Amino acid sequence: MNDVLSFSRDPRTRARALFRRLAQDVLIFGNAYRERIDNRLDQPLRLEVPLAKDARRGEDLARYYFVPDWGRETRIGNPVFHVMQPDVSREIYGLPESLAAHRVPPQLLGIIPNNTGGSGDVEKAARVFAINEIAPL
């Protein structure tokens, strides 16, 4: 972690920011990781949240890697807690984009209906979508 959160002096502010990052990773990627950093006596010192965008699970399912760029991978040697939303139709972890797209009303995606009745008022659909899907995030 080379961001401001790693150097925050107020532990409550840092804990809230790390939890926010963890929750955001779960909502966006369907995965989140929490890494325990130990001191020299192998006792827990603090928790870090590697970005889900750059974290990967190895072939050995107990190993995790941080891959910020192609060819630059670093093994995460500390214990990792992996939160994942498995895809029930595939044997992969993570949330594919196709599962989230079904919640967006078609009129907000610019889809023109084939029927004569249309798909309803765009403004009402946008308001309901904002209340039900965006606000909880």
Image: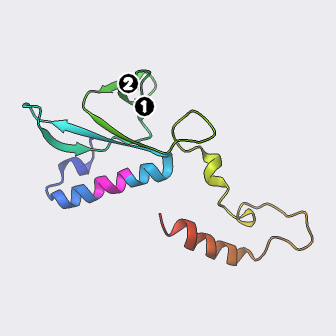
What residue type is disc 1 on?
Arg
108 to the left or right of 61:
right
Q: Is residue 39 magenta?
A: no
Which residue is at the far front?
88
Q: Position of residue 93 (x, y in %)?
A: 51, 37
Nearer the viewer's eye, disc 1 or disc 2?
1
- Closest to the observer, 78 or 106: 78
Sequence-first disc among 1 and 2 = 1
Q: Quadrant of residue 113?
A: bottom right
Question: Which residue is the site of mark 2?
Answer: 73
62 to the left or right of 137:
left
Q: Quadrant of residue 76?
A: top left
Q: Which residues fall within the magenta stretch?
A: 17-22
Q: Position of residue 100 (x, y in %)?
A: 61, 53
Magenta part mainly helix, strand or loop?
helix
What residue type is disc 2 on?
Glu
Label placed on residue 56: 1
Label 1–label 2 contact, CB within 8 A: yes
Compared to residue 91, the image places residue 25 above or below, namely below
Q: Position of residue 23 (x, y in %)?
A: 39, 54
